[in-house]
Image (cartoon, coloured by chain):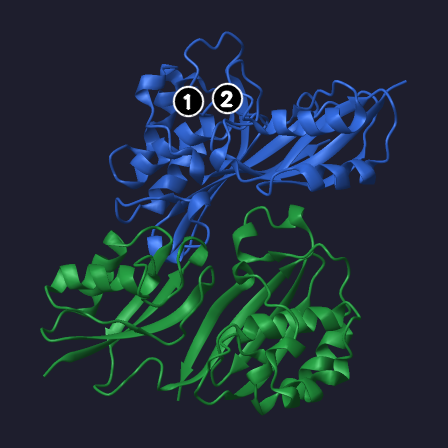
Chain colours: A green, B blue
C-alpha cells in the first residue's frame, strides 16, 4: 500500500525552464522537488503538478501530488523540502491525499493572474512578477467587453501556442476579471484548464483590444477562426502567476 | 538663481554598495542618479539623500535633493530618470523644493522597517527584502519590553558601527513598533536620525532578547556602557528598508 500526498508549492519561476521535466534540461521546478524527495526517501519519486507552468511563469498556489512506497509524516516531508529547496521555491503545506487523488486530472478549476504594470517606479520590489507595459493607457472598458465573448466552453485553438496539438483544444473559462489601479492592470483568468500559452495569448489579445487595435466584439470570430495567427502576441511569461487550483 | 528639487526614490539595494558615493566604487544609488541627471542637464549635479543607506539596504521612501542652474520641469526630470534608471531603482516623484531645503539636515524623522521572516516558504516572492531567521520562535513580549528603555534621547554609541565616529552619537528614538504575524516579525524604528548600522545593531540586540539570551531590562546599562562590543550582532542588511522621511 503506497501513501499518496498532496502539496502546495510557491515559486519565483524567473530562473527555471518551467514546471515540467524536459529531455534536455533538469532546471525545472518538478525536477528540483523530485530530486530532493528521492534523496530523502531513497525512492524514485514522481511529482505531478496541477498546472504545467511555462518557463519564467510563477506560482503562489501550485498543487502537486506524489506517492511514496514507505509512509512518511507529511510535516517531516514539508520541513525536509524547505530545508533543501533553493530560496525561490517554497512548499507551503504537505498533507495526505485520497488514494486516487491526482493533482491535474481532478482539478476542477485553475486561476491564473496576469499583472500588467503601468509605472516602472511603482514596481521596483515586484518587478520580476509584472509585465512592464510601456504603450500608454489601455482602454480597460473595451477589454472587459471583449472578455464576455470568451467566457464559457469554446474551442480555444486560436489561443493555443502548440501548433502540433493533437488533443482537444476545447476548454471552459468561468471568469475573467480585470481590475485597474493607478499603477497596474490585473487580469485574473479562472477556467477548467488552459492550453499551452493560452493565458498569455489571451492577455496579448486583450492588450490589443485595450490599445484600440482590435474590436472588442471580434472575439467570437477569433474563436471560430481556430487559427493562432489571428490572435494577438504571447504576453511575456514574467507577468503570469498560477494563483489557485480548486478541487470539487 | 538655481532651482532646488526634492525627489522620492525607491530601490532594491541588493546589488548596490549603498546610497553614498565612495572613493573606490561608483556602484551606488547616488551615483546612478547623479550620472543620469548630469547627462540630462549637462550640469554637474550633486544628489543628497536623507538617509545614507548601507550596502544591501532597500528604500521605499528615500528623499533626495538636488539643484540645477538651469530650470527644468520636475515631471520631465522624473520621466527622464525612470527611462534611464535600472529597473531596481525608481523615482516616485520630483517636485520643486524651497530654496534652502536640504533633504538630510531638514529631516525631522526617519522610519526604518526591519523584517524578520520566520518561514522561508512564505517569503518566496520577497525573499530579498527579509532576513530569514532560522533560530526558532522569538519572545516578542520580551523584545517589546526591551524597546521601552531605548526610547527617547540617548547616547547610542553602543549601537554605532563606526568605531572612529568623532561626531555626537546622541540620537532620539520616537517609536519602536514590533508586530508579529504567522510568518514574520516586523520592527519599525522611528527616530531623529540613526548612526551607521544603528538600526541593524538594535535589531540584532532585540533578537538576542527574543532568544532569551539577554535581559529585556538590560538596555539602560547597555546604553550607559557606550561600547559597541556590549551590544548584539549587526543584523543582515537585506532585512532593512528605509520607509519614510518626514519634514516639519
- The answer to whether marks 1 and 2 mark residues whose Cβ atoms lie closer than 8 Å is yes
Q: Residue at x 44, y 65 (%)?
A: A59
The residue identified by callout 2 is B195
* Residue B104 at least partly seen: yes
Q: Nearer the viewer, residue A116 or B210?
A: A116
**x, y percent for residue B154:** 49, 21
Q: Nearer the viewer, residue A233 or B234?
A: A233
Q: Is residue B13 left or right of residue B219?
A: right
Q: Name the chain under label 1.
A: B
- Looking at this view, name the residue that lies furthest to the bottom: A153
> Tag 2: Cα neighbours inside 10 Å, few (<14), some, or many (≥20)?
some
The residue identified by callout 1 is B159
Which of the image's four quarters has the N terminus of chain B? top right
**x, y percent for residue B122:** 39, 57
Q: Is residue A165 left or right of residue A19?
A: right
A139 versus A98 height, above or below: above
> Tag 1: Cα neighbours inside 10 Å, few (<14), some, or many (≥20)?
many
Amino acid at each position: 500500500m503506497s501513501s499518496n500526498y498532496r502539496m502546495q508549492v510557491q515559486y519565483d519561476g524567473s530562473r527555471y525552464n518551467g514546471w515540467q521535466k524536459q529531455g534536455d534540461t533538469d532546471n525545472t521546478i518538478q525536477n528540483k522537488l523530485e530530486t530532493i524527495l528521492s534523496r530523502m526517501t531513497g525512492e524514485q519519486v514522481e511529482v505531478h503538478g496541477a498546472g504545467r507552468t511555462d518557463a519564467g511563469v510563477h506560482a503562489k498556489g501550485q498543487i502537486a501530488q506524489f506517492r511514496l512506497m514507505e509512509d512518511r509524516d507529511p510535516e517531516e516531508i514539508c520541513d525536509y523540502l524547505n530545508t533543501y529547496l533553493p530560496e525561490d521555491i517554497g512548499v507551503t503545506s504537505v498533507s495526505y491525499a485520497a488514494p486516487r487523488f491526482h493533482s491535474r486530472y481532478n482539478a476542477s478549476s485553475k486561476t491564473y493572474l496576469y499583472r500588467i504594470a503601468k509605472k516602472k517606479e511603482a514596481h521596483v520590489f515586484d518587478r520580476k512578477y509584472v509585465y512592464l507595459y510601456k504603450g500608454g493607457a489601455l482602454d480597460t472598458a473595451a477589454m472587459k467587453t471583449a472578455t464576455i465573448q470568451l467566457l464559457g466552453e469554446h474551442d480555444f485553438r486560436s489561443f493555443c501556442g502548440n501548433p502540433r496539438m493533437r488533443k482537444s483544444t476545447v476548454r471552459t473559462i468561468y471568469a475573467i476579471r480585470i481590475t485597474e489601479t493607478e499603477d497596474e492592470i490585473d487580469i485574473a483568468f479562472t477556467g477548467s484548464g488552459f492550453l499551452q500559452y493560452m493565458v498569455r495569448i489571451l492577455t496579448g489579445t486583450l492588450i490589443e483590444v485595450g490599445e484600440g487595435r482590435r474590436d472588442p466584439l471580434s472575439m467570437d470570430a477569433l474563436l471560430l477562426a481556430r487559427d493562432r495567427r489571428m490572435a494577438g502576441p504571447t504576453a511575456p511569461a514574467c507577468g503570469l502567476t498560477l494563483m489557485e487550483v480548486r478541487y470539487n
